[in-house]
Image (tube, grey):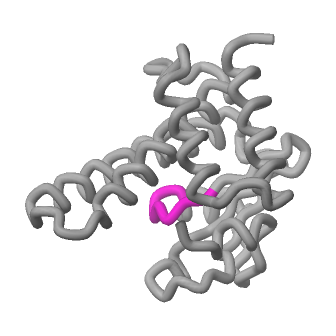
Amino acid sequence: MNAIQKYFKYRQSLIDQYAKGDMTKREYLQRNYEAVIYGDIGPFHNMDTVEKALFNYQYYNALAKEMKTVSTTRDMDYELKRDYIEKSNYYYSKKDKATLTALRMLDFQGVEAYFIKIRSKYLKGKLFEIVIPEEGIILHSTSTLILKCLREEGVFHEESRKSIIDDYVNRRY
């Protein structure tokens, strides 16, 4: 088992603990963040496999969420708060690059995507889910470029659906 596979096995154990109620969403996000930051892999500059692209997705998603969380700290200087938000947006853009790389490597085969029903008014009509059932992959994005590509490839369904991981995406952290 290589380092990426070990990470994904560990991540699955975190997901299982979260699903059983043994940890909160915040605890899950913190442990996943620590696993990608303090692990001995990635991010990969050359995403030449789907596995590497998916690791980069997780890596940058964890960083983006952490920066966003830090930006909500009370009594933080406005400039510092803005810096954290900018870092979060930067990491989300790197995550989207990894998403598009993986989708292109898969040639959009076996992919389906749709907007998800979300409680957040800000994300309603923006956040979509990308599912590759045969691979057990669930990704999320708000990228207009990815949305355009999914539509062009004929794999985007225009109706909103309940997320496969609805409890997770609709729970605040």
Location of residue 124 by image quarter? bottom right
Image quarter of the N terminus: top right
**Where is residue 136 drawn, in percent x and y?**
85, 45
Residue 145 forms part of the magenta stretch: yes
Horizontal arrangement in the rendering, residue 105 relative to residue 120 (left or right): right
Q: Position of residue 162 (x, y in %)?
A: 77, 78
Q: In which quarter of the image is residue 151?
A: bottom right
Answer whether residue 168 is magenta in the image. Answer: no
* Residue in view at x 57 percent, y 50 percent: 29
Q: Residue 145 location, x and y as percent?
A: 46, 58
Stretch in magenta:
140-146
Q: Which of 124 and 172 is in front in this view?
A: 172
Above or below 127: residue 55: above
Which residue is found at the position 60% from the left and 52% from the top?
27
Observer-nearest residue: 148 or 101?
101
From the viewer's perspective, tell me whether residue 44 is left or right of residue 3.
Answer: left
Instruction: State the residue at coordinates (90%, 44%).
Output: 134
The foreground one among 129 and 155 is 129
Residue with the most extreme right position: 134
Residue 14, image x, y percentages: 74, 43
167 or 42: nearer the viewer = 167
- Residue name at image x 44 percent, y 20 percent: 45
Give the vertical position of 16 relative to 116 (above or below): above
Number of numbered discs present? 0
State the image quarter where residue 74 is shown.
bottom left
